[in-house]
Amino acid sequence: MTKAKSPSPSGISTQSIIWAAIGWAALALMFYLFLSAPTDGPYTIKPEDCAKAIKDVNVRPNWYRLGTYIFQTVAIVASGLLCLRNWRSSKIISGRNVWLGLGVGILSWGIGNLIFGYLDFQYQSGLIAAGAKGAKDLVVTFPSIADIFFTTTYVFLSWGMAMSVVGRRLNLYPKQWAIVGAVGVFGLIVAAYVTFGVGGGFNLDTGKILNIVYALGDIWLLIVATILLLAFWGGKAAQSWRLLGSAGISMFISDLWFNYSINSSEVCEGKQYQSGEPAEFFWILAFVLWGMAAALEFDLSSRPTTRSRRN
């Protein structure tokens, strides 16, 4: 990492931001790995669409689920603000639209995530409270109003990531373009399997359409991430672009795992999706990496003299 200690307008050095981001990601990883077991219960529940009650169901405790949203929200807010700081700065040499797209997309995801979290808490609380009698008229977590913000996220993230490569002299070798193509095909196959194979065929209801939109957005993020990693491999001046690429891959992993968990859940067999899966850590990692990239780019652009970079 860069050894830059130049202070930001808030008085916090870039190095402090980087170490804080790494520390937050490490704490989040330990939280997910060691505390994610469903220890609350057992309960007897009867979801609305199920003919029989389900016994001996354990769920993740509310304090743990609340903790996951705290870890996510702090990473989202910090990362989004760092990206928007770059957009507002006239010194940024990499193109301010990149950071506008990322900042708006990240903060939009945060709003959607908080709405989804509220609905998720309401759903599980209502399900447990109803017990074996059967829950009725529970809130719907997917699709919901939160998906408006998640869809907005993909629009802006896709635009921001696209701006990071459009108009630049990437100079990739044919072998590298072949790698990009192979990664894109791999992402398409995995996304298609999760969306249609695990997701129960080609019936196009609202949820399926949203899953397709999210899958296409994830594939695009994966392709751009691969281009960034191949084009900017090596050199301190390219650190921010490598972090952007790594964030895109992390987002792809977490989103596809979430869709897989939703599509493979069997509510009436006691195998329903529960928030707080360890794979959700990759969301936090993605936001942390975007924030670190923004901080490094701001530091590099704020120096009196900057090294030439590959444009």
Image (cartoon, rainbow, N blue to C red):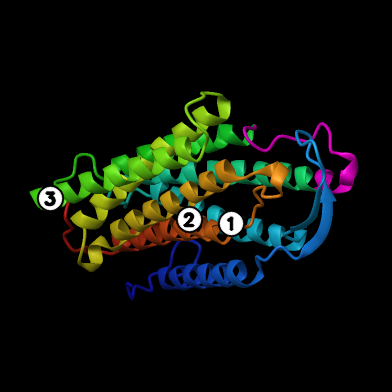
Q: Residue 172 carries which label?
A: 3
Contact between labelled residues 3 and 1, with CB atoms less than 8 Å apart = no
Contact between labelled residues 3 and 2, with CB atoms less than 8 Å apart = no
| Magenta residue check for 140 | yes
Q: Which residue is at the front of the view, 122 or 27?
A: 122
Q: In which quarter of the image is the N terminus?
A: bottom left
Amino acid type at circle 3 is Leu
Rendering coords of residue 139 (x, y %): 75, 35
N-term-proximal mark, 2 vs 1: 1
How far is the residue under mark 2 from the one under mark 3?
27 Å
Residue denoted by label 2? 287
Contact between labelled residues 1 and 2, with CB atoms less than 8 Å apart = yes
In what element is the residue under mark 1?
Answer: helix
Rendering coords of residue 203 (x, y %): 51, 24
Residue denoted by label 1? 72
Q: For the point 24% across and 63% down, which residue is it?
A: 237
Q: Residues in magenta?
A: 125-144
- Against 15, is 60 above or below? above
